[in-house]
Amino acid sequence: MSKSIVQAEDLSQEYRSGVQESQDVTFSESLPVLQPSKMTDLPFTIYTPESPLRHPGRLLREMFRDLVASRELAWRLFIRDISALYRQSILGYIWAFLPAIATTLAFTYLNSQNVLRVGDTSIPYPAFVMVGTLLWQTFVDALNSPLKVVQSAKDMLVKINFPREALILGGIAEVLFNALIRITLLIPVFLYYRVPFSGTMAWASIGILALILLGLAFGMLITPLGMLYGDVGRGVIMISGFWMLLTPVVYPIPKVGTAALLAQWNPVSPVLQTSREWLTGQSLTHIDGFFTVSFAALAALFLTWILFRLSMPIIIERMGG
Amino acid sequence: MSDDVVLVRADGVRKKFCRSLKRSLWYGMQDMVGEVFGNSNHDQLRAGEFWAVNDVSFELRRGECLGLIGRNGAGKTTLLKMLNGLIKPDHGRIEMRGRVGALIALGAGFNPILTGRENIFVNGSVLGLSKREIDQKLEEIIDFADIQDFIDSPVRSYSSGMQVRLGFAVATAMEPDVLLLDEVLAVGDANFRSKCFQRIGTILERCAVIFVSHDAYSVRRICNEVLWLRKGQPVFQGATEKGMQLYSEDPSDVAESESLLIVGDYIHNLTYHADIKEWPVRGNETAVDINIKITFDSDKEMQLGLGMANIVAAEAVVGQSILDECVKPIQVGKNIWDFSIRNVNLAKGNYSLVIGIYEIGNKRVAMNIRNSIKFSVKGNNRYGPLYAPIAYPGFASTSTSIDSKR
């Protein structure tokens, strides 16, 4: 046995000195001694032109492997982004709800001057608008997040191979973080307008998660195209402004007319409405729609995740760098 | 350190590329749709496309190093991107075993507002290091980058050299099984560069390495095999010495940049002719004589300032002759310049001659002939200096002389 080990060492020595004639060295049972045991459990990756959809099992395994592997990086990116945001800003986190305050002031003013006729709201109108816009903002945040994070990581994407899910997860963390800040803002608002705190408020967290889920599904859907064409990003900004007015954000769900029809077919309506009802302790009017949309959003998010994975190499190829 | 497990295997790998941006984006769209519906035809070239990498195959084991050589745009970086899994091959198959490290983008993911310490964690995570690994290596990274005093200052207050040093230190803290190395060695000051070489040297021993470089010296030293690509096509694959020799003798791979002729607007009908002769001095040592004749018509008189002839190899000037005394003021009408540079002792390889002549004051170009006079030297097989006097009485570079006739 000891003799064969010596032989194996000779082999490695020869290799080091650049001699390539290893044929005459017998490979004996000593070889495994040289081989590090970790050799066998090295990660193994194959790249082929085939669409990963041809091997759904492998695709799923890789998706969940990458999701798990990206947690730490996602956390780092999240911490990086919020701490950088905080450092180069005076208002810092206040920006999470400043737009909502502005919207509330505008609509409260318009309503008080009878320019708008919103009708009866279950809670004082300013609080109603505030809750609505904060929820809507969370949705829009989630909608914009995937394209935003992928775009800002362009330089990294074209040069380094890391689980791309980390970007999305980091973005989600930021959306959740902002949502949390917004919710805290509601406490003084509720106190001021004497909106009672109710037990159903805990349920609202599910509502907010559903809103984020819905926003992400849309966001992930447009990300591949948005990375290729700048039109998409601009279009989304325009459409989301318009979309807000078609969604019962600053007014309750209409009961008749085109607006009622639109609200019925607008997937955000039941989710936002139900979240608001949970937050303000009202009875639930659209819970069926809420669950339908939520589960559809969950399924859509999964499908758009696949789309995202399939398109990333193509996008990176077209981005150059 | 070597064993018989193949860590990298490329088999008939190809990749398409499209130069036009609009088209490229549209093809990207098509590819995405094809990817989803599984009907993409990767093997066919569409209008405006060409093979950026065409039919590359190789195997690499631990301790082995493959050098990728070729001109800019030959497809080396595209191949690296495929190996790194950033883009998919359009044909063939790539297998990677083990942890893949890429010394390609130093400091990717650095946020200028955050401190060096915070950025080490971000950058390390991006490169695939776990928090524990980074914690373990933090001190080592800071020491290696030599930025102890700055580690808690924002990265944007760093000099560019410090940023690169930090990026390199983080990137090399990882212990990869496969290393992709794309000409990042030339960073920082001389002292740091030597540290880089040492560090890379230790990594090389325990990895399979793919090394892209234009520096023939490094390729010869590090690689045991080279793959030479020309317009995506493998031209040669095999032993380093032979490959480098063929590569250095190939005239189509001489100049990295386009040939360029710039003249003042008063100069017309410029023609130039270079007569270059290599003659044996002793053994395989040779010297080169360069005779140049430039003729042109001028609309006006012009006093000249500086004039020089540079011998250029791989974008770097390796020799220079000042031509001040050879070029007389430009006269109205026909001008003929005739000058020669003699006894130039260049190492084996490919060169081009750049002639630059400036108007008085040295700001405006009277004439610049760039990368169109090419020549190769067959003798003087040297490692390192491209221009060195031959140690032989009477043939030292000090005897290089310039004659001029008008």
Image (tube, coloured by chain):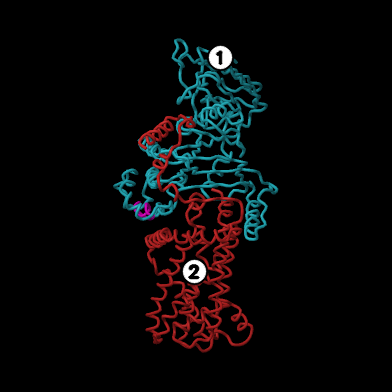
Categorize mark 2 by other alpha carbons within 10 Å: few (<14), some (14-19), many (20+): many
Left or right: B383 in relation to B154: right
Q: Main secondary structure of the magenta part?
A: helix
Label at residue A309: none
- Is residue A160 in sight in this rendering? yes
Label at residue B279: 1
| Residue A51 position within the rendered picture, expressed as x and y whole percent measured from the top left | 61, 56
Please name whichever residue, A208 or B20, is drawn nearer the observer in this view of the structure: A208
The residue sitting at the right extreme is B47
Tag 2 subunit: A
- Colour assigned to chain A in the rendering is red
Please name whichever residue, B13 or B376, is drawn nearer the observer in this view of the structure: B13
Tag 1 subunit: B
- Is residue B357 in sight in this rendering? no
Residue visible at 45% across and 61% down in the picture: A68
Identify residue type, mark 1: Trp
Please name whichever residue, A275 or A302, is drawn nearer the observer in this view of the structure: A302
Residue visible at 43% across and 66% down in the picture: A173
- Colour assigned to chain B in the rendering is cyan
Q: Which residues are magenta?
A: B113-121
Q: Is residue B270 magenta?
A: no
* Disc 2 secondary structure class: helix
Which part of the image, by quadrant, shows the N terminus of chain B? top left
Which part of the image, by quadrant, shows the C terminus of chain B? top right
| Residue A131 position within the rendered picture, expressed as x and y whole percent measured from the top left | 46, 79
Label at residue A141: 2
* Disc 1 secondary structure class: strand
Categorize mark 1 by other alpha carbons within 10 Å: few (<14), some (14-19), many (20+): some
Left or right: B159 in relation to A303: left
Place residue A27 in its image quadrant.
top left
Residue B341 versus residue A310 in the image, above or below: above
